Amino acid sequence: MDGKRTKLSVADFNPVTLQDDVYYVSVNASLNERICDLMNWHDLRAFIDWDKYYSTMGIDRIMVCEAVDEGVIVDAGSAITVDLMQDGLYQGGFIALGLRAAQEAYSRLSPALNVSFNFEVDLTIMAKNTPDALTVGFLAPLIEKIERLGKPIFLTGGDAHLLSRFLPEAVVREDLIFQGMNKLIEKGVKC
Amino acid sequence: MDGKRTKLSVADFNPVTLQDDVYYVSVNASLNERICDLMNWHDLRAFIDWDKYYSTMGIDRIMVCEAVDEGVIVDAGSAITVDLMQDGLYQGGFIALGLRAAQEAYSRLSPALNVSFNFEVDLTIMAKNTPDALTVGFLAPLIEKIERLGKPIFLTGGDAHLLSRFLPEAVVREDLIFQGMNKLIEKGVKC
């Protein structure tokens, strides 16, 4: 409200202290238990037209989609979700591993692959050393697939800026999830 | 020799029992210790023109490259290595996670992502359920990247047949590593 934004640990936060109407999305099961009886807390899941999406789709992923009418939404966090919106309609998407998860998975395969990605690498060139081979192997197929979807690209999530190096035409929108929530609240009803 | 092939556990195998000349590649450090003093055992590492490759490149990967003069070599095992050969010269490559490693990495991210890949999925379509979203997310970028390299594709390794579903024009060559070793032995000297 009033553009003010606060970030708190769920453990340090008592939902009862908020008297105003609260519109929320949550993927935290224990928080959900604490708020489901509070009359002023409104779960935005109830505002979603579920025919547009699918039942096991993450609510955070749906919210970033709601923010965009036309484009590819890339949410780069623990996983990298890639979703396509066209004329305000969800066209489907896919889920890649997040950067950290991918690096950890390589390191589990062999001590020789326990190296950091090289974010300075040229993804268009076949690699001739191990860090580049892993970085190109993970990022080049993914980045090229995203580009070939042929729509405006919106990047969000913790690794958005890192990925934007490889997607220079993409727009970074750190608050895309809140934009989606706002849009849904303003609509107010299922459409 | 004579086309006869035997598969043994390293633990059950005593290298001293072989009297003939043996040409080998090995990535097993403890086996290497047991054979380095045996005069009739010849490490094919000594036959490789290392200027063509890079020093930390896996010896198994080099051997499958040696088998091919012109093409893309995809070795789908615990990792999926993709390498490009042109006029007998190594052009570079990259390393993706193997199918099992990728699925395990997804399952570690969230119980919701602990699902099996759907190898019946159409990789050209954006997904609208979780198994398809993971399968498309991992395989579609990789398969399309391999195809766009624009060369004949040679598939080898334990998951070669599984991947060949998505690369119908690829040739599966289960013994590519032995073909590469043979070629190198016949050449006999660095070229």
Image (cartoon, coloured by chain):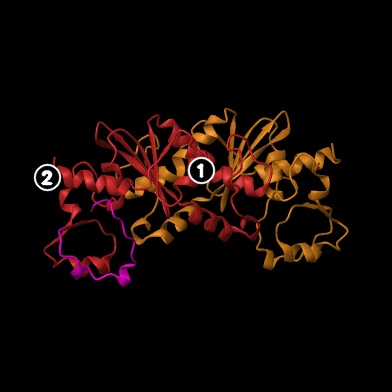
Chain colours: A orange, B red
**Membership of B105 in magenta stretch:** no
User: In the image, residue A180 lies at what x, y percent?
Assistant: 72, 41
Residue furthest to the right in view is A39
- Amino acid type of disc 2? Val
* Vertical placement of residue A37 versus B140, above or below: below
For disc 2, the chain is B
Q: Residue type at mark 1?
A: His
Give the chain of mark 1. Answer: A
Q: Which residue is mark 1?
A: A161
Question: Camera-side residue: B135 or A135?
Answer: B135
Mark 1: give few (<14), some (14-19) or many (20+) Cα within 10 Å. Answer: some
Note whether B27 is above or below A63 in the view shown: below
Residue A107: image quadrant is bottom left
Q: Name the dominant secondary structure of the magenta segment.
A: loop
Q: Quadrant of residue B33?
A: bottom left
Figure check: B177 above or below A144: below
Location of residue A114 by image quarter: bottom left
Separation of marks 2 and 1 at Cα, in angstroms:
49 Å
SS type, badge 1: helix
B53 vs A3, nearest the viewer? B53
Which residue position holds label 2?
Answer: B189
Q: Tag 2's secondary structure?
A: loop
Q: Residue at x 15, y 42 (%)?
A: B187
Q: Is residue B122 left or right of residue B7?
A: right
Region in magenta: B2-21
Q: Residue at x 28, y 41 (%)?
A: B67
